[in-house]
Image (cartoon, coloured by chain):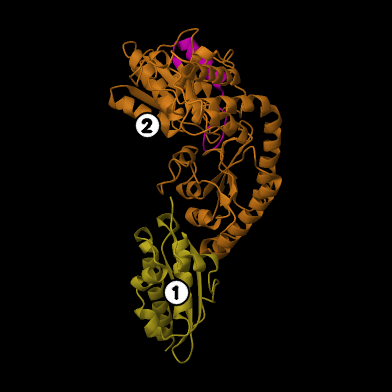
Amino acid sequence: MRMVYSEALTDHFEQPRHVGRLDGAALDVGTGQAGTQETGGVLRLQIRVDENGLVAETCFKAYGPPALIASGSWLAETIRGGSLAQAGALTHQSIVAALALAPSRWYCALLAEEAIRAAIQDYKDKQRAYV
Amino acid sequence: MSLRPIYLDHAATTPVDPRVLDAMLPWLSERFGNPASNTHCYGWEAEDAVERAREQVAHLVNAEAREIIWTSGATEANNLALKGAAHFHAERGRHIVTVCTEHKAVLDTCAELERQGFEVSYLPVPATGLLDPDTFAAALRPDTILASVMAVNSEIGVVQDIAALGHVCRSHGVIFHVDAAQATGKVAIDLSILPVDLLSMSAHKTYGPKGVGALYVRRKPRVRLLAQMHGGGHEKGLRSGTLPTHQIVGMGEAFQLARLEMADELPRIQALRDRLWEGVSMLDEVWLNGDMQCRIPHNLNVSFGHVEGESLLAGLGAIAVSSGSACTSASQEPSYVLRALGRSDELARSSIRFSLGRHTTEAEIDAAVLELRRVVERLRSVSPLWELAG
């Protein structure tokens, strides 16, 4: 099992950015979770959106191989400060390219894409319910 | 990374002891003769060296030199023992008994024998990893010709009750093979007492070179085998092929050192292993795999709950260890040995085998413990599941 990790992946795995949790009940927070322990990993991504529609804060936690931890960290770093639309436009291909993921670990990027979509949806659902 | 990782993977292979290397070198240069050349001194001196090494290997396991057959390693010794005995005795019966936690060199050889028409029973083990002699006895049938049980498990280091299992074989007239690749120099083996018919050994697990091993073949009562390698009739016709003098001399020297130094080495290694376990077990949710008492002092196999296996290994870059057996870690499949003990796939995947050796130091163990705790705690702090469990 000789896994070769890119420099970017190793960096995010060794020093993950924005690890933590936001208050999932808060109206301005969206939470998305993807994957299961049995199928290779769980990723939880949270975003806090400010009044201008910008992603003001991000948080993630992940259980899985280095590629999943790095995907969560990269995503939390990349979407921070951008618009919701920009965050929603990110696809797994961007993550695969940024971290140079091996094909056997592309599923980690897919989980990350699923998590960000779910987080945005959760935020929008809350906003809609509030209005 | 300029610093080499701390080596705690001696069950995969050991470094060649410098004294072994010294003994080997002349046989790669001026003393290059073929031990089978009986017409000149080049051959005679090589033959003498091979026979001296045969005595040294025999001495470690208290056998006679003429009961030792050189092979290329334990895998070949296992193949020769199992196929050789099965083929020779096929008329008497076609049933073979082994254990599901054996090394692949035994399991895959048994699978090949199944393909050839033999029937193999793979016995289960409880969570301790120790085969119950009664379970073993119950598995033997009138048509059972051969049984194979390893002395020391390569992954979890547990020591089987070879004496009890051997007596069961004797009373049933079954040939008993023991894979001792992980046992030489780690547990006392006295073949003048143990009812063992065939015993496989490897040099490179005991500070000798890779590429050489031996099969002990009992003479009284004599065990018959059918050769698997044909050629010049070397090794009494049981294993043809020019003998690699330098490798054999290395194995002899390594086994002599093991015999002379075992008594001092084992308590020292056990103290280090216990120190390692003390440090590791301070973490929450760690599980020891296999029995702690019936185990070689070199081995510690631990499952770390709530830590994913690949991340654990990747995080532990400063320590050279294996997860599962080195032979199976090319795949992502969880260790079949740990699964046989009843571990879940998740826990089996997040387990680490630490195997200590002759050159392991207390400073290395302390550094390894610190590193392990750092990595496990870091991975758990990143995990959303640990948050829920904690």
Is B386 placed above or below B110 here? below
Task: Tell me what residue is drawn at x 53 percent, y 16 percent.
Answer: B48
> Is residue B202 found inside the magenta-colored segment of the image?
no
At label 1, the amino acid type is Leu
Task: Please state if B91 lies on the left or on the right of B39 as rendered.
Answer: left
Cα separation between marks 1 and 2: 45 Å
- Work out whether residue B84 or residue B336 is closer to the camera in this orientation and state it: B84
- The residue under label 2 is B108
- Residue A12 is situated, as x and y percent measured from the top left of the image, at 50, 68
Quarter occupied by residue B37: top left
The stretch in magenta equals B152-175
The yellow chain is: A
Chain identity of mark 2? B
Disc ID at residue A44: none
Image x and y of residue B264, in percent? 71, 30
| Placement of A49 over or under B237, stated as above or below | below
Q: SS at mark 1?
A: helix
The chain that hosts pointer 1 is A
User: Which three-letter amino acid code belongs to the residue tagged 2?
Assistant: Asp
Badge 2 density bin: few <14, some 14–19, many ≥20, Cα 10 Å: few
What label does residue A75 carry, if any? Answer: 1
**Callout 1 crowding tier (Cα within 10 Å): few <14, some 14–19, many ≥20:** many
Residue nearest the viewer, comparing B87 with B291: B87
Image quarter in which the N terminus of chain B is found: bottom right
Residue B82: where, in percent of width, then height?
A: 39, 22
Q: Is residue B163 left or right of residue B272?
A: left
Residue positioned most to the bottom = A52
Query: Which lettered chain is shown in orange?
Result: B
Seen at 38% across and 12% down, the residue is B142
